[in-house]
Image: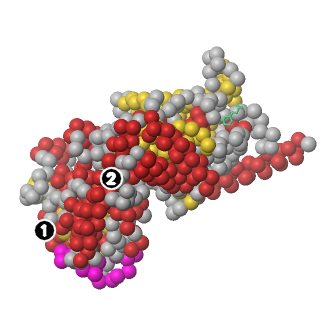
Amino acid sequence: MSKESKQTEYSAKNINVLKGLEAVRKRPAMYIGDVSSRGLHHLVNEVVDNSIDEAMVGYCDRIDVQINKDGSVTVSDNGRGIPVDIHPVEKRSALEVVMTVLHAGGKFDKNSYKVSGGLHGVGVSVVNALSEWLKVEVRRDGKIFFQEYKRGIPVKPVKEIGKTKRGERGTTTTFFPDSEIFKVTEFRFDILTERMRELAYLNKIITINMKDERNGGEEVSYHFKGGLIEFVKYLDASRQALHKTVYIEGEKDNTPVEIAFQYTDGYSENIFSYVNNINTHEGGTHLVGFKTALTRTLNNYAYKNNLIKEGKITLTGDDFREGLTGVISVKVAEPQFEGQTKTKLGNSETKSAVETLVGEKLAEFLEENPPVGKKIIEKCMRAAEAREAARKARDLARRKNALDNMNLPGKLADCSITDPEHCEIYIVEGDSAGGSAKQGRDRKFQAILPLRGKILNVEKAKLNKILENNEIRAMISAIGAGLGAEFDHSQARYGKIILMTDADVDGSHIRTLLLTFLYRHMKDLITSGKVYIAQPPLYKIKKGKEEFYAYDEKERDQILKRLKVDGKEKKKVEEKEEEPVAGEATEEKEIKGVVISRYKGLGEMNPEQLWSTTMNPETRTILQVTLESAANADKIFETLMGDDVEPRKAFIEKHAKYANLDI
Ligand code: 0RA
């Protein structure tokens, strides 16, 4: 090939690369979901996933993740290092290809279980395209290689910059997210640690070291020798396990399967399933295989050992899963993902692999551990009895029409239009705030349901008790889409369910109780993105006829600065400030003709204020409640609403700085 045509070929490749990067920068959401905090943190997950892939094929057992002082993130591993030799087709360093060509990352190894599907697996080139700058260092064959990029474009060719220590290998990537793309570019250490902890549970050979160099150098290291057994223990930290954890590990038809589960004294079913380390929120064939084998094996065992009296009671699949906490992790070479959020496994061969393996191993476990078997069956029998009792209670309630949406609760001020897509319901704490909301709303599309006082803690109550609670019944009938297994979010009478509680401790407790109820009994409302949290302002600042609202301290201070209330005076305001107490009157302070009032409860705002600050769709902010990690959400609710005081206190102290529960 002549020098010239080589050059043309090279620049043609370059044009393709530029086109690819441009596509990513033009439509970032298509590659990483969104450009909010969630998308931002996905960048780190994407880089780490590549190191995890390397760990899954057995070449890497250590990953370091660090937020640097300047806000960039470094991910380092001790894998084989990304190949740097000249790529036969692309005619340039393989490292450069991996970093700049879309989907080039996985082309080297065909026979491995790659993280793919969902939002992951788009390749590190996407991270590169969305970073203001990125630097990568590869340690391989005794040498250190380096390349730097700006918004995905290489600054210079890959260069050898030194020698490694003997035998040292690995890849180190440092990047700074592009503020032209992301609304926020500040990483949150707690969000990153959550996924890293999960990955460490799922891959027991790896150690993940984390450090936040920004403030005080917070450090944490995750390594779980017991893998999924420890994961289940962690999930059940404040539930009482009824027996030692059942652990199943094996491979069937080239599908590695790992499962741990245990029954607890609780009532909810908490099974988390993963495919290639991705949380399959919507379940799929691996989960079906597990459930089928569990029901069949336990049923057989119970009858064989005369633990169920024939004809007395029939145990259903649900009975075999009440109070069950478990994690299923499978590796699938070519996973097919289906469902609304592409988090449902579709591969049919995986169902039979899991079903066969669990059938064999669980039967074996039960034979070897008769006392555990007996305990499990007894627990399931109690579940069946409670289910019977709940059914009777529900029938009774139905007859009274309380759960029927034909009979809406008296406290509900419904909206006039009926198309759910355009309707929203505000679930409001307290009758007085409810009154303001009713007067302030746009009655065409906004419904108001005031709730009195604290609602029942569903985490600690049986279903029949839950159904007796008036506030809960009012919510069930207003939403009108059923409950629990019968819940169908597409039947919901409103497209948005907005929780509006006071900005104080009681308010946040009530909000958590409401979220717990929705999470446990109307989960699809949350997964379908219909649940929101209203954001009332904390301060009103008045100067002459002008009024300003501030939603936090920072905003208040910005407004004061604009109004030229100087730093000293501002400090005085802060000093006088006390934690708001529910029900007390607004505090007012006047400085140089500027009146600052701190709202202590929603009830203090008049209807117009409530409308303009919190309810008017044109001007309000509402926070969508998302289920980023189902395992973590479960853990949060269990911690916040369970019996143990210590983990709850620790959690609240740790997360107090975030106004809202991020589940
Ligand atoms: C493909 C082949 C080889 C290494 C990797 C991928 C690799 C990629 C990443 C990304 C982050 N860390 C990584 N570590 C390794 C090596 C193939 C060989 O050496 O034969």
Q: Amino acid under label 1?
A: Ser
The N terminus lies in which quarter of the figure? top right
Say above or below: 461 vs 617: above
The image position of residue 530, as x and y in percent, is 38, 65
Give the side of residue 364 with respect to residue 331, left or right: left
Residue topped by disc 1 = 432
Q: What is the tally of numbered marks visible in this picture?
A: 2
Ligand 1 shows up in which quadrant of the image? top right
Determine if residue 207 is in view. yes
**Residue 418 magenta-highlighted:** yes
Q: Main secondary structure of the magenta part?
A: loop
Residue 411 vs residue 385, the one in the foreground: 385
The image position of residue 313, as x and y in percent, is 34, 59
Q: Secondary structure at mark 1?
A: helix
Residue topped by disc 2 = 381
Name the mark nearer the viewer: 2 or 1: 2
Give the side of residue 297 with respect to residue 647, left or right: right
Give the side of residue 457 with respect to residue 491, left or right: left
Residue 87 vs residue 554, the one in the foreground: 87
Label 2, label 1: how many angstroms apart (C-alpha)? 46 Å
Residue 9 vs residue 614, the one in the foreground: 614
The image position of residue 523, as x and y in percent, is 37, 60
**Going 33% across and 59% down the picture, which residue do you hit?**
312
Local crowd at mark 1 within 10 Å, few (<14), some, or many (≥20)? Answer: some
Find out if the beta carbon at label 2 lies less than 8 Å from the nearest ligand 1 atom. no
Say above or below: 497 vs 493: above
Local crowd at mark 2 within 10 Å, few (<14), some, or many (≥20)? Answer: many
**Going 21% across and 77% down the picture, which residue do you hit?**
400
Residues shaded magenta:
405-426
